[in-house]
Image (cartoon, rainbow, N blue to C red):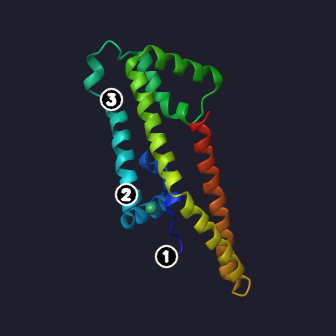
Amino acid sequence: MENQLTCNQVIALMSFYVEDKLNSRLKEYVDDHLRNCPKCREVYMQSKKIVNHIMSLGNTDNEQTPYHTKQYEDFRHNLSAYIDNELDENESIRIKKIAISNPLARKDLEDMYSFKKLLHDSFEKTRTESKYDYSKLIINKLDSKTNSNEAEAFNRLLVAFTVLISVIVFGFLATLYF
Ligand SMILES: [Zn+2]
């Protein structure tokens, strides 16, 4: 099982996983991890609940309320991009204004932030574990000097992967504190 993810890596990928945005290989790694890790499975269940709640708001119940406007549809359509800082400044301001004036939109935004916070808190909890993983990585790297080229290539891949995950995690943290 050379492709096992750590808890931190799984938490970092969780929002993409819940929104089904991972490629199939990465999704399989997360599936694997969740099968074997009750702690991350718990985070997944909570994440799923929040995301389902956000998704369901746009459907039946609220269609009767006066707040379910075309503007609100537009807000929902852009919510995920807004949270991920993918909108340009004007679009971003437009979404912010809708959230201020429309209670439905505001609720969606709060849910989205509690989702982010859940992932952030889970990440904090596993920080010591990440240190451990890092030192393990170094030891692996040292070991590989005496091992075959194959092991070295794998470690290099592992380092590249860890860097990628770190970028994702810090992107996450950055959006939390914007
Ligand atoms: Zn885990």
Between 27 and 174, the one lying in front of the other is: 174
Comparing 39 with 23, the one in front is 39
Q: Quadrant of residue 139?
A: bottom right
The extreme right residue here reads 145
Q: Residue at x 47, y 51 (%)?
A: 122
**Residue named by callout 3:** 57
Q: At which x and y percent is residue 144? A: 69, 82
What's the amino acid at mark 3? Answer: Leu
Q: Nearer the viewer, mark 1 or mark 2?
A: 2
Residue drawn at x 49%, y 76% as measured from the top left: 1
The quadrant of the picture occupied by the C terminus is top right
Observer-nearest residue: 21 or 130?
130
Residue at mark 2: 41
Q: Which circle's residue, 3 or 1, is located before the other in the chain?
A: 1
Q: Amino acid at mark 1?
A: Met
- Asked if the residue under mark 1 is in contact with the one under mark 3, i.e. CB atoms within 8 Å, the reply is no
